[in-house]
Image: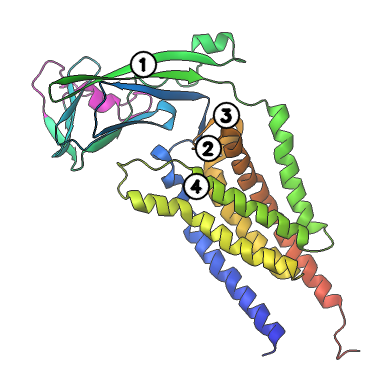
Amino acid sequence: MTGSRLRTAAGRAAVVLLGLLATLAVAAPASAHVGGGAAGSDFDAALHSVSPELPGVAVRVLQFGDELEVVNDTGTELTVPGYSGEPYLRIGPDGVWRNALSPATYLNLDRYGRTAVPDDVDVVAAPRWEQVSTEPAYAWHDHRTHWMTQGQLPPVVAAAPDRSHTVAEWAVPMALGGTEVTVSGVLTWSPPPPGWLVWPVYVLLLTGTVAAGWLARSARPLGGVLALAAVASLYHALTTPVPPSTVSSHAGAIVAGLLPALLVLLAAGIGVRAALRQRGVLAGLMAVVVGWLLLVQGVPDVDVLWTAHALATGPQLLARAAVAVLVAVGLGLVIGGAGAARRFRDDARAVPSPAAG
């Protein structure tokens, strides 16, 4: 086998391998998000204080206020009352226990409290405790921290939707041993970015990427897009918030969130190298693989493109820009990469061989 054929076979094998890995990575990013829900929202719930401070107890607001998470490593039991003051949760060294006779047990199962409450529920009856976890950590939809009316804006927001607003100041009572505790914060709303400003940018990213594959005279512009894609993919993965401590496999969720980005780095590196060496067919094939991986990362977060807040530990503008690259450039690489692979393959066939001469 000649060196040229060997390189071609190796390139095809790399494409097949990366395609298989991309398929395995499809379900990874969605499970890695905090709470596993939406990545963008116009609402946001910020935790202001835990009073008094409780060393060994970690309280976190998840999903823009949709969930509240408590991790109690103190060795002392922490209790959380329901909405009528009845016993609801016990979080301590023997795990998490939930009162089956508390209405909150059923109302908190759904984001909007639509779960039916059984007829035998009684807030004044003696608690009927049921263990729901063996770990001292629990996350639940606490309806005091988020807006409850689906499809309807708060009155203050509806009156002036072009401005940011404080919707409510919230507080959740708890008790650690005999110490009363108050967890407090604020729920805000912010207007989303104007469509006339951001959508042309998304369209430009898409059309520019497709043009790099279909119209550029060499594969190098496609290599530049691949480099941009690798940076955006890695940034998005590193700024995604840490998953809840209550997920079944915390370390596994982190690895699952990083897997597509690592595969993008590998495939983009091969593609950039091929583009610099003017191996347009391999660069195009790598672009298709990278584009698919970008869509795997970006589609679960697509709501970030039209909402005010994004689940990210870095600046909101960069978080939205990264998702725009994942979605728009990802789709553009799939289309443009296929065009580049076909076009440069046809160009190679059109060049006469030395033997023919």
Question: Which quadrant of the view contains residue 110?
Answer: top left
Which of pointers 3 and 2 indicates the residue nearer the eye? 2
Seen at 82% across and 58% down, the residue is 216
The answer to whether residue 217 shows anywhere in this view is yes
Asked whether the residues under the numbered discs 3 and 2 touch, taking CB atoms below 8 Å apart as contact, a structural biologist would say no
Q: Position of residue 15 (x, y in %)?
A: 60, 69
Asked whether the residues under the numbered discs 3 and 4 touch, taking CB atoms below 8 Å apart as contact, a structural biologist would say no
What residue would you read off at disc 3? 307
What residue would you read off at disc 1? 170
Q: Position of residue 185 (x, y in %)?
A: 38, 19
Crowding near the residue tagged with mark 1, few <14, some 14–19, many ≥20 C-alpha atoms within 10 Å: some
Seen at 54% across and 70% down, the residue is 17
Question: Disc 3 and disc 4: Cα gap in Å?
Answer: 21 Å
Residue type of the residue flagged with mark 4: Leu
Residue 125 lies within the magenta run? yes
Q: Earlier in the sequence, mark 3 or mark 4?
A: 4
Which of pointers 4 and 1 indicates the residue nearer the eye? 4
Name the one closer to the observer, 206 or 102.
206
Asked whether the residues under the numbered discs 2 and 1 touch, taking CB atoms below 8 Å apart as contact, a structural biologist would say no
Which of pointers 2 and 1 indicates the residue nearer the eye? 2
Q: Main secondary structure of the magenta part?
A: loop
The residue segment tinted magenta is 101-128
What residue would you read off at disc 4? 238
Q: Position of residue 18 (x, y in %)?
A: 55, 66
Question: Disc 3 and disc 1: Cα gap in Å?
Answer: 23 Å
What residue would you read off at disc 2? 314
Residue 160 lies within the magenta run? no
Q: Secondary structure at mark 2?
A: loop
Question: Which quadrant of the view contains residue 121?
Answer: top left
